[in-house]
Image (cartoon, grey):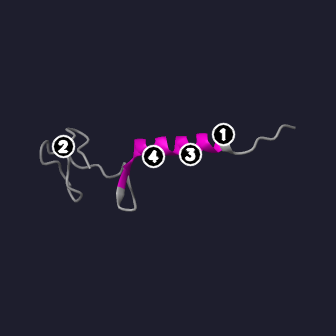
Amino acid sequence: MKCTNCHKKLENEAVWCTRCGMPVDRSRQVMIGGVRISFPVWVVLITLFCAFMILWLPRTIH
């Protein structure tokens, strides 16, 4: 995980950044199988999934 202010790599249990003192914001991150995924990554993944489903699902013309 990186600090949102100075981008220094942080320990997983860090509450504050040791470089700039900024509190660690964990609300924008999700754990999946022990891997943290940030909000922008979620947006990209959901967008790709939706685009794939739009192209893959059959279309019916009435």
Residue 58 position by quadrant: top right
Q: In x, y percent, where is residue 56?
A: 67, 44
- Res 8 label: 2
Q: Are marks 3 and 1 in contact (CB under 8 Å)?
A: no
Residue 31 vs residue 49: left or right?
left
Q: Is residue 20 magenta?
A: no
* Nearer the camera: disc 4 or disc 3: 3
* Nearer the camera: disc 3 or disc 1: 1
Q: Give the residue pinned by disc 3.
A: 49
Which structural element holds mark 4? Answer: helix
Q: Give the residue pinned by disc 4.
A: 42
Residue bounds of the magenta highlight:
36-54
Q: Indicate the amino acid at tag 1.
A: Leu
Q: Earlier in the sequence, mark 3 or mark 2?
A: 2
Q: Indicate the amino acid at tag 2.
A: Lys
Q: Earlier in the sequence, mark 3 or mark 1?
A: 3
Q: Is residue 51 magenta?
A: yes
Look at 37% across and 48% down and name the residue there: 28
Which structural element holds mark 1? Answer: helix
- The alpha-carbon separation of the residues under discs 3 and 1 comes to 10 Å
Residue 53 vs residue 61: left or right?
left
Look at 52% across and 45% down and name the residue there: 46
- The alpha-carbon separation of the residues under discs 4 and 1 comes to 20 Å
Give the farthest residue toward the right: 62
- The alpha-carbon separation of the residues under discs 2 and 4 comes to 22 Å
* Nearer the camera: disc 3 or disc 2: 3
